[in-house]
Structures are given as structure tokens and as C-alpha cells.
Amino acid sequence: MWIHFDLLCDGGTQRRLHRIFRKEIEGWQKRGFVKGAILTYHFHTPSIPTDSLYLCLDIPAVKTPNKRTIGLSTEVASQIPSEIMTKVKRFCNENQTRANIDDYEFNMITNESGKSYRNAPVEEILRFASAGTKIAFEFLDASEDIEATWSGRQKELANSIMSRLRNELGDNYFWLPEAFHFVCNPMLLNEAYLLRIAFL
């Protein structure tokens, strides 16, 4: 089941937490706690109260209840592995933020999130968002300073991202542009510019 930790904080704190949770996610995946992940920035300059880092985890140990609600019941929340909850609480405390937790998939169904992604079904949003996040992590693992690494090679970077997405999702996958967003966002890249040159 996909669990969403909405970490309310400004851009600087989001950058710090993004690095921390990227490493944690990789460890959780190796240990089988997490099957997939989406980690995306949502901040403005100057900061506004709703700015938040989305930490979304596909946690096999959490079983989908028969009656779903956006907010997690005590029964569902108790199924989240204690290591994940302990780390989320710890990093929130250390960075003076808090996490609102909900059923990510049901939240998207209820709020008709597919309309924002060319009417993609929720299962496809989860598929391409987690694939994009995975690819972004691979780039970031190779170099934290993406812009410096790819300086002067924007066309090559755009093509590299698109090539990886096609390998993950298929050459003719309809929502490739939407998936592209989930690669660029974690790397804080100019998505509109790169997407445009990727399709030249």
C-alpha cells in the first residue's frame, strides 16, 4: 500500500531531507521494507505555509483495508514498519518539521489527480512517478551536482533521461512527458526546457 508522508517545510529544509531520505529509501528497498518510492519537492520562493516534501512509499507490509479513508486508521498506521516510522519522526524532529500521513493512492483517487496527468489512471501515475524517481536517484547517486556534471550538455542530459524512461516504461508509453517530471523534480532541473529539447 502506498503511504504518503507530507513533510511541511521550506525549500532549504526540503533539500536537506531529500538527501537524507534518498539514502534511507535505498536501504529500505534493499531490506524489502519498500517496493517503490516517490520523493518530490513542492516549494516556493519566498516560502509559503503549504510548502512540503512528498515522501511516498509503497510498503508491502501495509495491507489495504476494506474500508479506505484518506487519513490512516490506527490499524493501518500500526502496520508501517517501526524502522520507517522511527526514522521519519527522528528526521522531522531534527529538522523542526512534522509529517502528515495518509493513504496516497486513495487520496489521489478521491481528488481525481489523474486530471493533472492527461487523465492517467492512478495506477499509471504511481507507475511512472516511481519509475521517474528511481531514475532521478540513479543520476543523483552518480553526482549530487547535476548541473555542474552536465554543464553545456543539456541535449545529452535530456536524451539520457528520455532513454532511461523508455527503457523503464516502453518506447511508446503515452505518459512519458509526465514521467519526465518525476525525474527532473528530484534533481531540481528545468523540466520544461529539457522536455522540449528531448522531443526535438
Image (tube, helix red, strand yellow):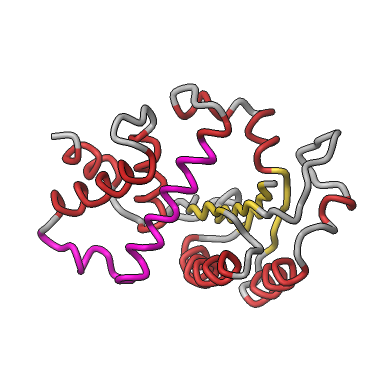
Locate residue 34: give its quadrant: bottom right
189, 59: nearer the viewer: 59
- Depth check, front residue: 84 or 194: 84
Quarter of the image where one finds residue 180: top left
Residue 70 image offset from top left, x and y in percent: 76, 39
As drawn, which residue projects farthest toward the right? 75
Residue 138 lies, in percent from the top left, at 36, 63
Q: Position of residue 80 (x, y in %)?
A: 76, 59
Left or right position of 45 against 200: right
Look at the image and say whether residue 136 sits in the magenta stretch.
Answer: yes
Residue 120 locus on image (x, y percent): 49, 26
In the image, residue 171 sits, relative to residue 84, either above or below, namely above
Number of on-image labels: 0
Tell me which residue sits at (29%, 35%) in the image.
171
Of 68 and 36, nearer the camera is 36
Q: Main secondary structure of the magenta part?
A: helix
> Which residue shows up at 15% across the image and 63% down it?
151
Does 127 appear above or below 114?
below
* Quadrant of the drawing holding the C terminus: top left
Q: Please tell me which residue is depicted at 63% across the width and 51% down the height of the picture.
A: 58
Task: In the rendered view, tell whether residue 142 sits above or below residue 152.
Answer: below
> Does 197 sit left or right of 118 as displayed?
left
Q: Is residue 10 magenta?
A: no
Looking at the image, residue 32 sits to the left or right of residue 45; the answer is right
**Residue found 75% across the figure and 65% down from its top:** 81
Q: Which residues are magenta?
A: 125-152
